Amino acid sequence: MSHPAMSRDDLAQIAFLGMGVMGAPMARHVARAGNDVRVYNRTAAKSLAWVALNGHEASPTPAEAAEDADVVMMCVGDDDDVREVVLGDHGCLATMREGSVLVDHTTASAGLARELAGECAERGVGFVDAPVSGGQSGAEEGRLTAMCGSDDEDVFERVAPLISTFAPTCVRMGDAGAGQLTKMVNQICVAGLVQALAEGVNFAQRAGLDVDQVVEVIGQGAAQSWQMDNRARTMAEGSFDFGFAVDWMRKDLAIVLEEAGRNGSRLPVTALVDQFYAQVQQRGGERWDTSALVDVLTNP
């Protein structure tokens, strides 16, 4: 969903917290759209390196980065990291002014999103949970998908053009937490697709077929997917040096399975794939791309 461009007068000062493989390029797109950006990272060298490449300003704490900001955006590791960055001793919420908005792009729990929405509301601050999909390449190229939750549609509409600088598809899915729940659906679907693709590639190899030719043919039919287009050939090569690490997928699937335990969903395939990812970790593949599921099949 596209949103009208937002002028610099609308959003003069942006804070971006988290300069990892996703946050750094996302912040770059925000800056290139004409906003003033102040960045923070727990490892200060990363924020200083970002400033060296992009200009603008780095801050030593989330609180200092958020001071006077119209919008604070963040993309950090997990629930604990989010709580520390937002609510910790030097958290951003302490200095955010009334009427500003906090946007969390971290893939985290829906319960945390609702908790933050409540904390923000008490201080007159808007909140949007906006996890993204598309991986490191999507962040670099500005073609992520943002799944958003907010209790206030007007708050979402205010920040949607800003999010759209790196996520052209930016949709409010419901109240606070709905963005995180939608991202869980995304990860359920991705996990199953990657495992099926790994099994297909391994089968083709063991059957003596040309994997490139197989992918070219079946990719024109019902089996086609982003994973097939982008990962089948690299799976066959045993190349796993891409952006989204197995460690992060297991973190996401833990959130998914915990939520399923609460809402009564049955996720037998997701739980099984999570255990296959555990095997990848055990063989030293913690930082391999999620397509490394094939390694468990090709090198049992």
Image: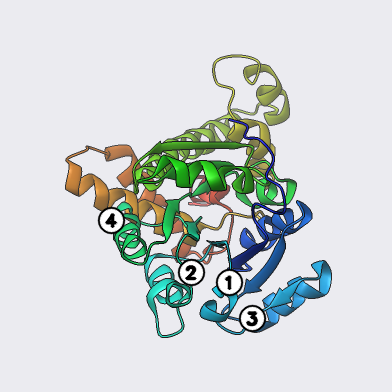
Q: Residue furthest top?
A: 221
Q: Residue 193 bears which disc, if any?
A: none
Circle 2/circle 1 CB separation < 8 Å: yes
Quadrant where the N terminus is found in the figure: top right
Of residues 50 and 215, the one nearer the viewer is 50
| Secondary structure state at the residue bearing disc 3 | loop
For badge 1, the amino acid type reads Asp
- Badge 3 density bin: few <14, some 14–19, many ≥20, Cα 10 Å: some
Badge 4 vs badge 2, beta-carbon distance below 8 Å? no
The answer for how far apart the CA atoms under marks 3 and 4 are is 29 Å
Q: Mark 1 or mark 3, which is nearer to you?
A: 1
Residue 105 or residue 246, whichever sits in front: 105
Q: Amino acid at mark 2?
A: Arg
Check disc 3 and report the residue beneath it.
Answer: 59
Query: Pointer 3 and pointer 2: residues touching (CB < 8 Å)?
Result: no
Image height check: is 37 above or below 257?
Answer: below
**Disc on the earlier residue, 1 or 4:** 1
Residue 239 in percent (x, y) is at 68, 51
In terms of sequence position, does the residue under pointer 3 or pointer 2 come before the other? 3
Q: Which mark is residue 97?
A: 2
Residue ID for mark 4: 111
Q: Nearer the viewer, mark 4 or mark 2?
A: 2
Q: Mark 2 vs mark 1: which is more N-terminal?
A: 1
Judged from the image, the secondary structure of the residue bearing numbered disc 2 is loop
> Label 1: which residue?
68
